Amino acid sequence: MTGTSRLRRSLGAATAALALAALAACGSDHPNSTFLHWTEFGRDIDFLWDRLLGWGTAVFVLVEAVLVYTIIRFRAKPDGPTPVQTHGNTTLEITWTIVPAVILVFIAVPTVRTVFKTQAKAPDSALQVEVIGHQWWWEFKYPQYGITTANELYLPVGRTVNFALKTKDVLHSFWIPNLGGKRDLISNRTNYLWFTPDSIGAAAMNGQCAEYCGDSHANMKFKVFTVAPADFESWAAHQKRPAVFGVAPAAPATPAVPVKSAARGAVAAAPAPADTAPPVGYAFPADQIKPFWWPKTPLPAGLAEIPDAVLAQGDAARGKDTYSRSACIGCHTITGNPMSMGVIGPNLTHFGSRHTLAAGLFPNDAKHLAMWIKNSRMMKPGVLMNTQGMNEMDPMMHQKVTTGGLTDAQVADVVAYLRALK
Ligand code: HEC
Ligand SMILES: [Cu+2]
């Protein structure tokens, strides 16, 4: 085989590989792409990326072209004469010093400008969200609204959001690829990250911890919804209220006419705000969420499922009772249930309004919830929530739960209760 045909063959192979890679990139959708222009932050970073890629490609092509040309043009020939011997070339040396310096300036100026812009203080009108990382879940507080929730983040489109990033334990990193980030959560320190989701309508996207933080780091995900401002207000107003379960359910909305007549002067007829408020606030509609978004984590082998027939017998009122007498209350808060004031685990006040369970690891349905309560440590390695099912093997304690464990029927009741907390 001659040198030229070998070269031609490897060039052919390289082209084929490149084409394949390019095709693969077109074939599937890319739910976690960072190359989207949905926030000013995303656009700024994308601009820098384009610059770098552009300059990098230009330098690569130029250098490789000269190299390949030189290799071929000046290769040694069997009886060739000795090449001309040179030492130094001032013009060339000055050129190859100045050109990269100029290129670096073109990269450095926009980079430094972006660093200053993204490190600046967020505008005062921004929506404040406190993000607290826990092994291995996310706590979200909206201090302007008095809301504490977990693992699912609602953001109004068109309003700057300012995240104050903190951690309860080790380092984590907050990352929503579609919107921009990532930024670390550092012990004894608050980091900030802000951007405006301004070029996207209602959308469901993924978030992920991006700094190794222990056993279930890969399972420390979260979900993000960008929603219309009015929907956000509806969601926020509802999340602020105490748990719905226990309140008289879904009274028909008060018709407009009696309210008007009451406003005209009647003293007693005006209904209390709690009665007129819709029973449930906005939640991102499940049928508008794309298939990629839904978690597909398999259930662990060896964990006995609770039969559907048993789950169907679950009773929310009984469940509230059982829950309120179990270990759950030491770790979880349900506002409106005075027994339940723990702060070790996620706030469950409106748990039934969430679409996912255990930091985005499972869909929030009766089956997964039941398995979770029964043996969370088999569902997600290392979790702080200890095994709650009677006679279940706790994989961290290496022993079976014998006292205080919940039977399948009791778990079914607790499931009904938690699912009623819309
Ligand atoms: C020792 C503290 C502790 C106890 C006791 C406990 N939990 Fe938990 N729970 C946690 C922690 C921590 C998490 C977060 C786990 C994770 O996702 O990494 C959690 C997560 C959950 C979740 C998922 C929340 C979400 O937003 O995804 C539910 C539901 C839940 N627990 C219900 C219960 C119930 C019901 C009981 C009682 C039968 C209970 N827990 C007992 C600490 C506890
Ligand atoms: Cu992590």
Image: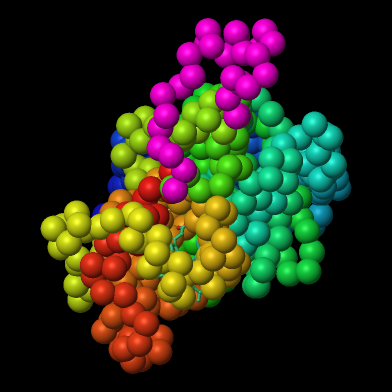
Judge left or right: residue 316 versus residue 48: left
For the point 54% across and 64% down, which residue is it? 340
In the picture, which quadrant includes the C terminus?
Answer: top left
186 or 317: which is nearer to us? 317
In the picture, which quadrant includes the N terminus?
Answer: bottom left
* Residue 306 visible in image: yes
178 or 323: which is nearer to us? 323
Count of numbered circles on the image: 0
Image location (x, y in percent) of residue 215 = 47, 75
Please say if 186 is above or below 269: below
Question: Does the magenta segment cover residue 268?
Answer: yes
Judge left or right: residue 290 versus residue 260: left
Quarter assignment of residue 34? top right
Tell me which colouring the rendered structure shows: rainbow
Image location (x, y in percent) of residue 109 = 83, 38
* Residue 95 visible in image: no
For the point 33% across and 92% down, which residue is it? 399
Please say if 44 is above or below 93: above
From the image, give the main secondary structure of the stretch colored magenta: loop
Identify the magenta region: 246-273
For the point 76% across and 55% down, which residue is it? 191
Image location (x, y in percent) of residue 240 = 61, 42
Judge left or right: residue 395 versus residue 382: left
Please say if 305 is above or below 285: below
76 or 81: which is nearer to us? 76
Question: Does the magenta segment cover residue 102?
Answer: no
Image location (x, y in percent) of residue 408 = 23, 70
